[in-house]
């Protein structure tokens, strides 16, 4: 143990600046813990003029990725006309944030009115 400490101190003295800090940290064998919060991005795929999934459940303000696999543009527009209106060009991906208010939001494509979906914000 004593040789290990002496070697670490000698190495730290030999190095300067950030290198010394890195050497001192490397010499410490105690476990390091950190907390990283990963927020999953929810996805709506558009294929063959359909939203998939037809119903998506997300948290308030969650990021939602819309992947348009069709060769034509679509929109993801809330039926109330004010909560969200996202244009999604052909063969592109767009990300938007879910509304900040909990509730059920029916939506449609303004270009293709037969396309419908439901966003549930918890």
Image: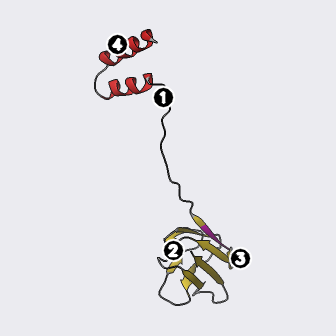
Q: Position of residue 75 (x, y in %)?
A: 56, 81
Is tag 4's residue or tag 3's residue first in the polypeptide sequence? Answer: 4
Is tag 3's residue or tag 2's residue first in the polypeptide sequence? Answer: 3
Q: Nearer the viewer, mark 3 or mark 2?
A: 2
Q: Nearer the viewer, mark 4 or mark 3?
A: 4
- How far is mark 3 from mark 2, CA to CA? 24 Å
Query: According to the image, label 2 marks what residue?
Result: 98
Task: Say above or below: 39 vs 8.
Answer: below
| Image quarter (top left, top right, bottom left or bottom right) of the C terminus | bottom right
Is tag 1's residue or tag 3's residue first in the polypeptide sequence? Answer: 1
- How far is mark 4 from mark 3, CA to CA? 67 Å
Range of residues picked out in magenta: 43-47
Badge 2: residue crowd in 10 Å (few <14, some 14–19, many ≥20): many
Q: Are marks 4 and 3 in contact (CB under 8 Å)?
A: no
Task: Say above or below: 24 vs 59.
Answer: above
Magenta includes 78?
no
Q: Position of residue 101 (x, y in %)?
A: 48, 79
Marker disc for residue 48: 3
Q: Residue at x 49, y 49 (%)?
A: 36
Badge 1: residue crowd in 10 Å (few <14, some 14–19, many ≥20): few
Query: According to the image, label 4 marks what residue?
Result: 10
Is tag 2's residue or tag 4's residue first in the polypeptide sequence? Answer: 4
- How far is mark 1 from mark 4, CA to CA? 20 Å
Task: Say above or below: 2 vs 113.
Answer: above
Badge 4: residue crowd in 10 Å (few <14, some 14–19, many ≥20): few
- Judged from this view, the residue extending furthest toward the left is 17
């Amino acid at each position: 143990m004593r040789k290990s400490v002496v070697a670490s101190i000698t190495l730290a003295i030999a190095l300067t600046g950030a290198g010394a800090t890195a050497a001192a940290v490397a010499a410490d064998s105690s476990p390091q813990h950190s907390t990283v919060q990963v927020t999953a991005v929810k996805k709506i795929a558009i294929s063959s003029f359909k939203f998939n999934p037809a119903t998506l459940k997300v948290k308030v303000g969650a990021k939602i990725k819309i992947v348009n696999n069709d060769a034509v543009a679509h929109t993801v527009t809330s039926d109330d006309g004010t909560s969200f209106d996202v244009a999604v060009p052909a063969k592109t991906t767009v990300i938007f944030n879910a509304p900040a208010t909990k509730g059920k939001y029916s939506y449609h494509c303004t270009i293709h009115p037969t396309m419908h979906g439901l966003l549930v914000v918890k």
